[in-house]
Amino acid sequence: MTSTPQTPPPHTPATATSRRATFAAFMGAFLEWYDFWIYGTAASLVLPRVFFPDSSPTVALLESFATFAVAFLTRPIGAILFGHFGDRIGRKPVLLITVFLIGGGTFLMGLLPSHATAGGLGAILLIALRLIQGVGIGGEYGGGSLLALENAPQGKRGLAGSFHQLGTPAALLASTGIFAIVTQLPEADLLSWGWRIPFLVSGPFLLLGFYIRKNLPETAAFAEDRQESKSAPFLALLVEQPKMVLIGIGARMADAVTFNIINVFAVSWVTSTLGMDSQLILTGFVISSAVQLVVLPVAGRLSDRYGRRPVYLTGIAICALGGGILYFPIISLGNALATWAIIVMVHAVGTGLMFSIQGALFAELFGTKVRYTGLGVVYQGSALIGGGPTPLIAVALTAAAGSWWPAGAYLVLACLISALCIWFAGETYRNDLADVEPDAEGTDRASGQVAA
């Protein structure tokens, strides 16, 4: 196990390229997560009635969540496919494709015919777009993270990575705010055309993201690496670093499961089970996202100074206690201030401490020639296991038990898995992304330390 160094790594000043790369990474994350939040909220509130009106409310909700989950099936394909080319020919050309697949897919969903217009055709097209979009999202995270991380000044990688992750709360603010507005429409207008507005708004975001990326150079670490590219980065990753792949996937489970329990599942739970207004939770996440805009860079800076592991473990502990044990009893009270406070605690602080530094942490586990693939496989593998199926699992567990507690227990279990993985991952924050090429045993050749 790596011992934590006594002093943080030295700092170098930011450059114009590093600042532009960080903003480009932010825009990619914004597009990716705008799609995620928009679709997750719509799947809870309107898509069951737009595309599955002939089913009972519970079955329609399950069918809607199934379309939410189906994109996670193709995310690993995108991670492997785009990771292959991103590690062989460079980050930039691949990222120009992924941004179109994500933003274009969301925009086209806003044009789909409803069940009332075209019967089941709308649902079929929706699933097809989700599958295609999943491929793009699968390739986005690894390259988007590396735009910021491989151009980051030395000693500020956690901070740079946190600015990439700021795209997530910014997207949640935008998507939740837009949905909060359209849900004020009369129900007939919301179900006929109002629900389309949040999806169509992705069009301008797509054009801006493409323009910014088109004018960026290749990342510094990839350009400086003189090693010959791996002929098959995915196979090389599995052969050389299978332990780090499993550790990375397990480490992200807490974050993936927590959000899908406290947001995607909880929105439907408070409306269908408690009969409460969904605005209570939607408003809470707007507030929490604003708080997270401050939490993320602070967490990134702390991880640059004290290491990734203590920051990440603190986030896991907050999610296990706040999300798995306290969350549902508190929101059941129906008190706005108490609900918003627990959402801020679990989402803004708990998941924020983890999410802020995931890009930096996972990048530091892998060498340059498999790093794009490694980040994609870790992120999308954990999303496939802990993200997409979670709302379905939570609905099934609570329906069987007649209570929220199995969903909470599921969240706590995910947190325990992540805590073990982070502990065994060791400390990585002093690794140099321009040099590091871990061997099969996890040794960092740049520093001579053992990663786990």
Image (cartoon, rainbow, N blue to C red):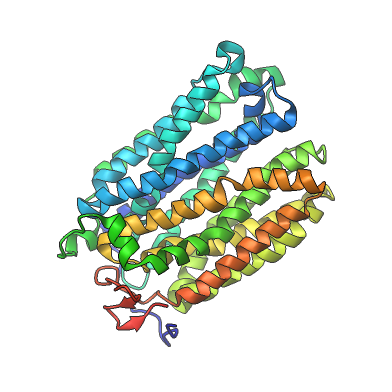
Question: Picture quarter containing residue 205?
Answer: top left
Left/right placement of residue 209 relative to residue 357 reads left
Residue 195 visible in the picture: yes
Number of dots carrying numbers = 0
Q: Residue furthest bottom?
A: 6
Q: Position of residue 283 (x, y in %)?
A: 68, 44
Which residue is pictured at 68% across the width and 29% down the height?
60
Quadrant in which the N terminus is drawn: bottom left
Residue 202 visible in the picture: no
Front-most of residues 432 and 206: 432
- Indicate whether 437 appears above or below 44: below
Which residue is pictured at 31% across the width and 53% down the height?
21
Q: Position of residue 207 (x, y in %)?
A: 35, 34
- Indicate whether 440 appears above or below 209: below
Which residue is pictured at 44% across the width and 77% down the height?
427
Left/right placement of residue 212 relative to residue 409 reads left
Q: Residue furthest top?
A: 117
Quadrant in which the C terminus is drawn: bottom left
Question: Picture quarter containing residue 363?
Answer: bottom left
Left/right placement of residue 77 relative to residue 130 reads left
Which residue is pictured at 55% across the width and 59% down the height?
253
Left/right placement of residue 355 relative to residue 47 reads left
- Indicate whether 42 appears above or below 410: above
Q: Position of residue 220 (x, y in %)?
A: 23, 61
